[in-house]
Amino acid sequence: INRGEINGILLGDNGYTCTQFLLTPLLHPRPGPETRYNRTHVKTRRVVEKLFGRLKMKFRAIFNAF
């Protein structure tokens, strides 16, 4: 964090538009780099989703409040 800014990117699904700070999967990837990008995107999001699932189990009271 530098002067209120956070360096990095976010991963989103196709419900969002791809921007310079939010990466989403390509809808119709061509073979090669685009397909590898989508595959890597999915693998990375799975790790994050698993982590959120574990956090929800560990801190149920917090997540059930919403």
Image: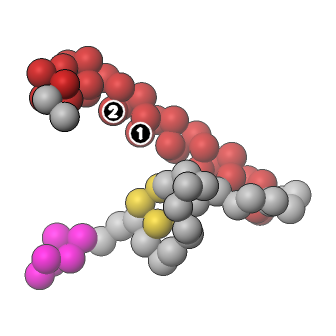
Q: Which mark is residue 6?
A: none
Please tell me whether the stretch drawn in magenta is mainly helix, strand or loop: loop
On the image, which quarter does residue 32 sit in?
bottom right
Magenta part of the protein: which range? 1-6
Judging from the image, what secondary structure is the residue with disc 1 in? helix
Q: Residue 4: horizontal and vertical position, in percent?
A: 13, 77
Between the C-alphas of marks 1 and 2, the distance is 6 Å
Local packing at callout 2 (Cα closer than 10 Å; few below 14, some 14-19, many 20+) is few
Residue 31 appears left or right of 9: right
Q: Does the magenta stretch include residue 4?
A: yes
Q: In this view, does 36 lie to the left or right of 55?
A: right
Vertical arrangement, residue 45 with respect to residue 33, above or below: above
Q: Quadrant of residue 15?
A: bottom right
Q: Are marks 1 and 2 in contact (CB under 8 Å)?
A: yes
Look at 11% across and 81% down and name the residue there.
3
Residue 22: x, y in percent? 46, 66
Q: In which quarter of the image is the N terminus?
A: bottom left
Image position of 38 (left or right of 54): right
User: Is residue 59 visible to us here?
Assistant: no
Q: Does the magenta stretch include residue 42?
A: no
Quarter holding residue 25: bottom right
In the picture, the disc for residue 52 is 2
User: x, y (%) of residue 58?
Assistant: 20, 19
Which label belongs to residue 48? 1
> Is the C terminus in the top left, top right, bottom left or bottom right quadrant?
top left
Identify the residue shown where x is 31% and y is 23%: 54
Residue drawn at point x = 41 percent, y = 65 percent: 9
